[in-house]
Each structure stands twice: as C-alpha cells, then as structure tokens.
C-alpha cells in the first residue's frame, strides 16, 4: 500500500468521517492537499533561491514528519470496530439521508 498522500487524502476520510459527512470530509481533505501543493509550488523555489537546496529538503522533511506525527496522534484505528454512527451516534448531527419526493401539479 502507498503510505504517501493518498492515505491521508482519500483513504482516511472514508474511514474517519461518518456517512452523512463523508463527502464533505473527503472534499476538505482534498482541498487541503491542493492548497498545500499550491503553497509548495510557490514557496519552495523562493526558499531554494534564498537558502539553497538543503533548506528546501530540511523543510520538506520537517513538514512531512509533522504531518505523520499529527496523523499518528489524531487518527483513531477503526479496523473491525463498530461504525462511527454506532460509536458516536449522539455526537453526530442526524439529518435525513433521503430527499422528499417533489409534488407534481396536474
């Protein structure tokens, strides 16, 4: 399995967010990844020009290790556990999952 960005952008939100919020959670994770990529594309060449390649590599390593540490500390292992709705039903805002049928006029 790939242990790179795919895990935290696509695989984890599907496991961590309850069914009602899964699409929004995946979108938030994907948007965050794109913001990070855009910031990196803009700032890394500037940092390289000012401080050299070693500074870029150290910064990328620190950010990657920080992301791994935050993921390890905040992500709850769910393998084989009950669903999020079963475990945290009171904390999850319930909203209807089906849309009402529109009324047609004659």
Image (spheres, rainbow, N blue to C red):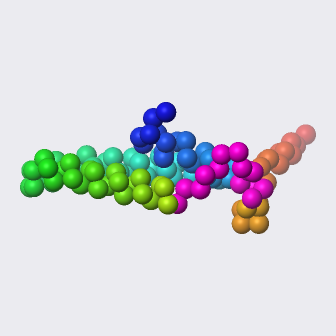
Would you say the magenta stretch is mainly helix, strand or loop? loop
x, y percent for residue 43: 21, 53
Q: Residue furthest bottom?
A: 91
Q: Nearer the viewer, residue 1 or 43?
A: 1
Q: Is residue 67 visible in the rendered structure shown here?
A: yes
Tally the marks: 0
The residue drawn where x is 90% and y is 40% is: 106
Q: Residue 58, percent across and down?
A: 21, 53
Residue 80 falls in image quadrant = top right
Given residues 27 and 101, the one toward you in this image is 27
At x 68% / y 53%, what residue is drawn? Answer: 18
Res 90 quadrant in image: bottom right
Farthest-out residue, top: 1
Left or right side of 24 for 73: left
Query: Which of these two is toward me, 26 or 96?
Result: 26
User: Magenta part of the protein: which range?
Assistant: 74-87
Residue drawn 55% across the image and 42% down it: 11
Residue shown at 40% from the left, 55% from the top:
67
Location of residue 91 with respect to 99 vertically, above or below: below
**Would residue 3 be counted in the magenta stretch?**
no
Q: Is residue 90 rendered to the left or right of residue 8?
A: right
Q: Is residue 101 left or right of residue 72?
A: right
Percent across and percent down for residue 71 are 47, 55
């Amino acid at each position: 399995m790939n242990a790179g960005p795919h895990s935290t952008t696509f695989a984890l939100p599907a496991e961590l967010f309850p069914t009602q919020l899964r699409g929004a959670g995946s979108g938030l994770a994907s948007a965050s990844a794109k913001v990070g990529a855009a910031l990196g594309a803009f700032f890394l060449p500037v940092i390289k020009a000012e401080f050299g390649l070693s500074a870029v590599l150290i910064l990328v390593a620190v950010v990657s290790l920080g992301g791994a540490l935050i993921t390890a500390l905040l992500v709850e292992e769910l393998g084989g556990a009950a669903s999020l709705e079963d475990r945290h039903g009171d904390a999850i805002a319930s909203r209807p999952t089906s849309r009402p049928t529109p009324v047609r006029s004659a």
